[in-house]
Image (spheres, rainbow, N blue to C red):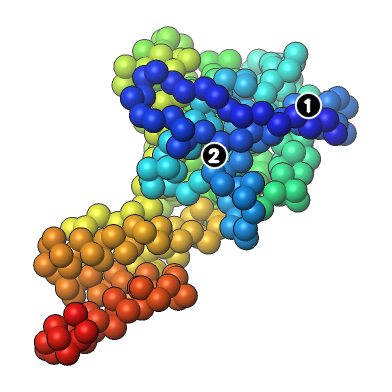
Amino acid sequence: MRWTFLVFQACFALFHVACGSVLAETVELEFNSVALDEARPILVRLPEGYEEGGAQRYPVLVVLNEKDNFEWASYIVGLQASRGAMDDMFVVGLPATDNYSGDNYPFAKTGSLELNDRSQAYSHFIREEALPYIEQNYRTNGGRFIVGHSLSGLMVTHMMTQYPDAFSTFIILSPSLQHAPQLLGVLSDFFKTNGPVESQAYFALGSLEHETIQQGFSGLSEVLKADAPDGWSHEQTILAHTDHMLAAFKGTYDSLAWLYRDFSIPTDRVQAMKASEIIDHYARLSRQLNYRLLPRQRGMTGLGWFLEKRIGNKAAALEVLKAAAHFYPEDEKIKSSVARLECRSSDNTATTCGE
């Protein structure tokens, strides 16, 4: 394997933020694929601080299409993670080479259900070669997400029907269904024959995209409405003021925001929750994302302080900090805060409780 270490330097002018906190090291390697019988580039964006060592493990986001898509996704992950909106993660780019259509078009020809051998080999490369390599050589935690745009959106949709357990979330942006309308029938049959679907999916299309791709997306809407299992976790949305190319950027941002929509619990909601309910909330989210997800330690302590000092709801603050103590049992400050609030809840004075 050939290894090259570089630093991801791109900062995007449309974001008026300090870029230093969202950049991370990127590893570029060349992988000899048996399935494809060729060497393929793999790009790996490391989570912030990963090279410093430690035991922390991270989920993986696989990004198809081009190197640009990888760079956008890397920036977006760094931005959202640095703002506490989501967990940091590995971003694994599998950029296209000379056979983009062959890799990503699922069928042997338009209108046929016969599978494209090259695309099947590419799917195998993603699932059985590249991803296992990452999981064997980096500190991953079992969380697996994949994003494909345009023709790669077809690939990801078809992969979901064949291997729904390969990823916990399939992100499908501007899928070129006008080139493969038969895929809608495959998707419908998948829903009808597979029962409950454990993985979740996010579908998006730009509002400014051309009419034929919009028609395909409308057909997708009809299939989801008619055949998707009750309770299946999925989102289908139109990205306002967005064309086909920008859908790759905005769709990645919005899909990750959707994926981690329950990462933080709003203050109005958390005030009605017991510690056990907060713990159960993150247990459900962990099952959904297929890795043990912990609420942010600083976020929990900050929320407890806010509820006590700003809102004046000491009972809610106590429940939040009890949950925090469950997730971070070695944190002495959290344990001390729990003891203090429990003391005050017994009508003791501040002096008696050590305040």
Q: Is residue 220 visible?
A: no
Look at the numbered disc 1 and give the secondary structure of its residue: strand
Q: Residues within 10 Å of mark 2 (few under 14, many from 20)?
A: many
94 vs 288, nearest the viewer: 94
Q: Position of residue 301 (x, y in %)?
A: 32, 64
Residue at (36%, 13%) from the top-left corner? 208
Q: Nearer the viewer, mark 1 or mark 2?
A: 1
Which amino acid type is marked by label 2?
Answer: Phe
293 vs 88, nearest the viewer: 88
Of the image marks 1 and 2, the number of the one nearer the N terminus:
1
Which amino acid type is marked by label 1?
Answer: Arg
215 vs 38, nearest the viewer: 38
Residue at (35%, 73%) from the top-left corner? 334
Q: Is residue 164 above or below residue 94?
A: below
Asked if residue 124 lies left or right of residue 62, the reply is right
Q: Is residue 149 above or below residue 124?
A: above
Work out which quarter of the rendered image holds the N terminus and state it: top right
Of the numbered discs in the image, which one, if any, rests on residue 170?
Answer: 2
Quadrant of res 259: top left
Q: Is residue 48 above or below residue 243?
A: below
Quadrant of res 180: top right
Q: Which residue is mark 1?
A: 40
Asked if residue 126 lies left or right of residue 344, the reply is right
Work out which quarter of the rendered image holds the C terminus and state it: bottom left
